[in-house]
Amino acid sequence: MRFTNFALAAFSMGSALAAPAVHQSHARALQVISTATSTVTTVQTTVQGELQSISKLVVSIGGGANSTALVPQLEQSLLSIAGEVTKIVGAVLPLVTEGVPALTQDELSGLPDLLNGVLSIATGLQTTAQQVVNGVGADVLKAVKPELQLVLSTVEPIAKPIVSLALGAVGDITGPVVSEVQGLVGDIEKVAGGILAPVTDLVSKIL
């Protein structure tokens, strides 16, 4: 009887200790998602501005403007984008190295915003890279090749930790938010692994 009482007491104590631990783990996961979303949103705004600048430069160069004066601006915008996107890796990767516990449907509500931000950055880079490849001459493309490849190479490193974070948070649960998250993860992986490849292949052929 005493053993039974002791066992029950130990179980109750263990449960009492476990509950705060689970709560703290979920709180940390929510903070990770919030921090990652904030970082991605900030970077997305800056990148969109640079992509618009690049689009204008490409139109000007394609229209016959002096490329000698515009190429340095194009190179600088590409470098700025690479630097901004890399900030996501620096901010997010340390947060997800310890792993993220599976969350509830309600707790997952902020995850689509994070994934949509990453997807927007990736597709924006893909579209603009294709515009550069199609809109400028071989001499200009050769000049900006290192910067363009650098920008393209940033997509996968930001996609991997974000996808890992999302899948860890989803776990084995099901529901509308989970379906949305899984769809966005698939879109991100497609952009990171497939859509950018033709642009990279074309640029790599430039001497």
Image: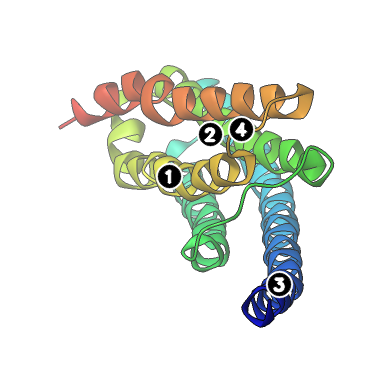
The picture quadrant where one finds residue 7 is bottom right
Q: Residue furthest front?
A: 1
Residue drawn at 54 percent across, 53 percent down? 85
Tag 2–tag 1 contact (CB < 8 Å): yes
Tell me if I can see residue 61 in this picture: no
Give the Cα separation between the discs numbered 4 and 2: 10 Å
Label 4 sits on a secondary structure element that is: helix
On residue 151, the disc is 1
Mark 1 / mark 3, whichever is N-terminal: 3
Which residue is labeled 2 in the image?
125
Residue 111 drawn above or below residue 195 = below
- Residue 119 image label: 4
Question: Does dot 3 land on a helix, a strand or a loop?
Answer: helix
What's under tag 1, amino acid-wise? Val
Q: Earlier in the sequence, mark 4 or mark 2?
A: 4
The amino acid at mark 3 is: Leu
Q: CA distance from mark 1 to mark 4?
A: 15 Å
Q: Nearer the viewer, residue 162 or 98?
A: 98
Q: CA distance from mark 4 to mark 3?
A: 50 Å
